[in-house]
Amino acid sequence: MDPDAVLYVLGVAARQGIQDVAAWRPAVAGVVEVFHARFTEHAYPMHVHDAWTLLIVDDGAVRYDLDRHERGTPDGTVSLLPPGVPHNGSPATTGGFRKRVLYLDMTHLDAALVGPAVDTPDLADPLLRTRVGRLHTALADPGDAFEAESRLAFIGERLRAHLRPGDLPAGPPGGPRGVAPDLRELLDERLCEGVTLAEAARLLHAHPTHLVRAFSAAYAIAPHQYVTSRRVDRARRLLLDGMPPGEAAAAVGFHDQSHLTRHFRRIAGTTPGRYARHARSYGLQGPF
């Protein structure tokens, strides 16, 4: 988490039934707040939010009242509570619960979906739950904002499919050759400074989810994976030229050195520092 984006990370007294809480505001359009908590006894009173509440429970269960109906979060459920509708919440199991919550503005879910969400707030959808979990993972690292934006676009689409079936936007063709090559050119041009999915959609006159689908179908790799691999590739060349890992990370568009290291290790099988040292030990004519 970016320290500047963290709202608070704290432990609260055991008498309040709270073990730990973390919340932050990521630099991802549409996400008002990310909130993770472990509660043992704490019960929320009736309250409202001005944002959509997208909730998954990892341990235990929650019971809550929404629009005078008792609801709950059985295993594998994704709960979507609409803005402006009072609700409460309390542990439904003796051990309490651990939850992850996203508060979303109206970017992906508009006011017309409030009624359907009141009627069906708890969605038994394993794929949606998996996607929400992966979005939380991406949101934990400020350097993965482009990935998070892409994942959020598909989550919004799937939520709309649940709440308003058959009313999904169709992506425009994007010209004779389609939008995939155009998106690739844009990603290449903006590799270091980056581009948001929303900006790419505006520039290419295509829906965000259509952009991601078209690119993935054309090149067998998601746009955020393409950008990350290209940046790692550039970083390798800079490391071979003798640039320190921290400077290389900034030069190719990673958030910081730790962000480079995480992806570098996954792609190259080693850390940037070890890669550079090993390359220098062999010289430029060695196995690299």
Image: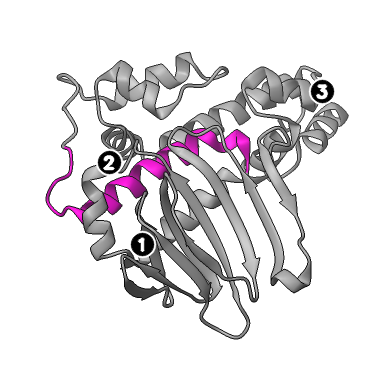
Nearer the observer, disc 1 or disc 2? 2
Q: Residue at x 49, y 16 (%)?
A: 190
Q: Is residue 219 visible?
A: yes
Residue at 43% from the left image edge and 60% from the top image edge = 130
Quadrant holding the N terminus: top right
Q: Seen from this angle, which residue lies furthest left? A: 166
Q: Is residue 143 magenta?
A: yes
Q: CA distance from mark 1 to mark 2?
A: 22 Å
Please say whether residue 162 is visible from this viewpoint.
Answer: no
Q: Residue at x 33, y 36 (%)?
A: 212
Q: Nearer the viewer, mark 3 or mark 1?
A: 1
Please identify the dominant SS of the magenta region. helix
| CA distance separating discs 3 and 1 | 41 Å
Marks 2 and 3: in contact by CB < 8 Å? no
Note whether 78 is above or below 7 in the view shown.
Answer: below
Question: x, y (%) of residue 250?
Answer: 70, 21
Q: Secondary structure at mark 3?
A: loop
Q: Residue at x 58, y 39 (%)?
A: 25
Quarter of image, res 204: top left
In the image, is residue 64 above or below residue 252?
Answer: below
Sort mark 3 into few (<14), some (14-19) or many (20+) by Cα contacts within 10 Å: some
Q: Earlier in the sequence, mark 3 or mark 2?
A: 2
Mark 1 or mark 2, which has the lower sequence index? 2
Span of residues in magenta: 141-169
The residue singled out by tag 1 in the image is 127
Position of residue 130 relative to residue 172, above or below, is: below
Query: Which residue is labeled 3 in the image?
Result: 244
Amino acid bearing label 1: Leu
